[in-house]
Image (tube, grey):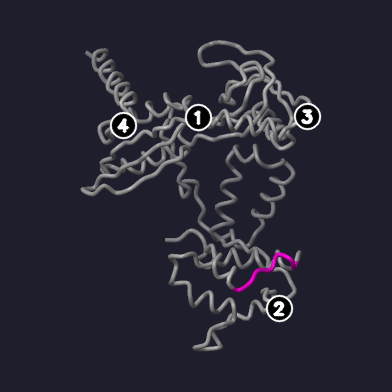
């Protein structure tokens, strides 16, 4: 069963956005060749008739032409000078209604907007007969010991960080590390927020002015977050930060072999979803995954490999392989 309406594929969405954009700014109109390139790609021959219909170029049967666009000075303009509304399906409305029940939605929506959406959805006639239940939405958790508690303080800190990232401002934070150290009133340059589905937690990638190196701070560990002054020469500082990130990126990726049994590949993809990866089928129901990572992510990669157990074999590099073997031996000796 498909959750979303089959007509809401990428091509339908592209055409909706294209027409609405052209109505707002006719300089955004493209040539037929440019539209065909955007829609088809090099490998999607099956969309050829669709493309011809959009461009009103169907020569076999004029009734197949969509009559959405016309050519004007080599550019395709909308025939109807009205915007195309985005219409949600019943399933999409039900999905949104359920997601709004999740406290994480408080992090991304203002209370007034959330209340407005909930009232509109609750009174929507389409939802009255829809058998929505919470277990219809699969929210997988591989680490049941980790659960994000959304408190008013957490929400306030999250929104301050978003404001600082968008406004290019410094932050003053107090970070309580897992090792028990308290780093009070650190002045940092915020870079971006990252979410780990595995641990159900948000982390802030940033650069403390004292250490002058990229670090990650778990939002659960931040007891104070305050927005500080604007960052001068932000683009230059951002360029320097990204240069430091590149320098901490390991030249050799971790290569693992996955036996595709008991959903091992599915779990592996889930665990490494936040990394840049390259995968291919080796044959004999085995897959190869290359994981590109930064130096400070090494321990996380080793933990994930150990979590997957005997379904995964480390191919390279040697130092990762050695540390995984050492961790397994140590666990075995402690168990005895």
- Work out whether residue 62 or residue 252 is closer to the camera in this orientation and state it: 252
Neighbor class of circle 2 (other Cα within 10 Å; few <14, some 14-19, many 20+) is few
Instruction: Please name which of the two marks, 3 or 2, marks the residue nearer to the observer.
Output: 2
Q: Residue at x 62, y 34 (%)?
A: 192
Does residue 257 belong to the magenta stretch?
A: no
Vertical placement of residue 325 versus 40, above or below? above
**Quadrant in the picture for residue 164:** top right
Q: CA distance from mark 4 to mark 3?
A: 44 Å
Report the residue marked by disc 1.
147
Secondary structure of residue under mark 2: strand
**Quadrant in the picture for residue 88:** bottom right
Secondary structure of residue under mark 4: strand
| Spot occupied by residue 258 in the image (x, y as percentages of width and height) | 29, 40
Q: Which mark is residue 230?
A: 3
> Earlier along the polypeptide chain: callout 1 or callout 4?
1
Report the residue marked by disc 4.
316
Neighbor class of circle 3 (other Cα within 10 Å; few <14, some 14-19, many 20+) is few
Report the residue marked by disc 2.
72
> Earlier along the polypeptide chain: callout 4 or callout 2?
2
Q: Are marks 4 and 3 in contact (CB under 8 Å)?
A: no
Q: Residue at x 75, y 29 (%)?
A: 231
| Spot occupied by residue 212 in the image (x, y as percentages of width and height) | 62, 20
Secondary structure of residue under mark 3: strand
Vertical placement of residue 159 versus 134, above or below? above
> Earlier along the polypeptide chain: callout 3 or callout 2?
2
| Spot occupied by residue 329 in the image (x, y as percentages of width and height) | 25, 18
> Earlier along the polypeptide chain: callout 3 or callout 1?
1
The C terminus is located in which quarter?
top left
> Earlier along the polypeptide chain: callout 4 or callout 3?
3
Instruction: Please name which of the two marks, 1 or 2, marks the residue nearer to the observer.
Output: 2
**Which contiguous range is marked in magenta?**
26-32
**Quadrant in the picture for residue 29:** bottom right
């Amino acid at each position: 069963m498909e959750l979303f309406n089959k007509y809401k594929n990428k091509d339908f969405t592209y055409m909706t956005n294209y027409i609405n954009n052209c109505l707002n700014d006719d300089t955004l109109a493209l040539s037929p060749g440019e539209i065909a390139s955007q829609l088809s790609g090099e490998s999607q021959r099956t969309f050829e008739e669709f493309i011809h219909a959009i461009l009103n170029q169907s020569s076999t049967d004029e009734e197949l032409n969509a009559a959405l666009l016309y050519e004007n000075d080599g550019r395709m303009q909308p025939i109807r000078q009205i915007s195309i509304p985005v219409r949600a399906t019943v399933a999409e409305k039900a999905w949104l209604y359920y997601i709004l029940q999740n406290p994480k939605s408080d992090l991304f929506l203002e209370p007034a907007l959330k209340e407005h959406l909930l009232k509109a959805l609750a009174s929507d006639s389409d939802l009255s007969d829809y058998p929505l239940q919470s277990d219809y939405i699969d929210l997988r958790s591989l680490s049941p010991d980790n659960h994000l508690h959304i408190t008013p303080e957490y929400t306030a800190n999250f929104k301050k960080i978003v404001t600082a990232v968008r406004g290019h401002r410094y932050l003053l934070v107090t970070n309580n590390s897992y090792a028990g150290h308290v780093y009070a009133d650190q002045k940092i340059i915020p870079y971006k927020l990252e979410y780990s589905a595995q641990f159900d937690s948000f982390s802030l990638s940033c650069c403390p002015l004292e250490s002058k190196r990229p670090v990650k701070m778990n939002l659960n560990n931040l007891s104070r977050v305050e927005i500080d002054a604007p960052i001068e020469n932000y683009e230059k500082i951002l360029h320097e930060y990204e240069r430091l990130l590149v320098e901490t990126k390991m030249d050799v990726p971790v290569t693992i072999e996955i036996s595709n049994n008991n959903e091992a590949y599915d779990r592996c993809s889930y665990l490494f979803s936040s990394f840049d990866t390259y995968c291919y089928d080796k044959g004999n129901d085995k897959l190869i995954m290359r994981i590109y990572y930064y130096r400070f992510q090494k321990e996380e990669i080793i933990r994930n490999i150990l979590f997957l157990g005997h379904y995964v074999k480390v191919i390279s590099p040697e130092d990762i392989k050695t540390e995984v073997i050492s961790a397994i031996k140590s666990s075995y000796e402690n168990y005895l």
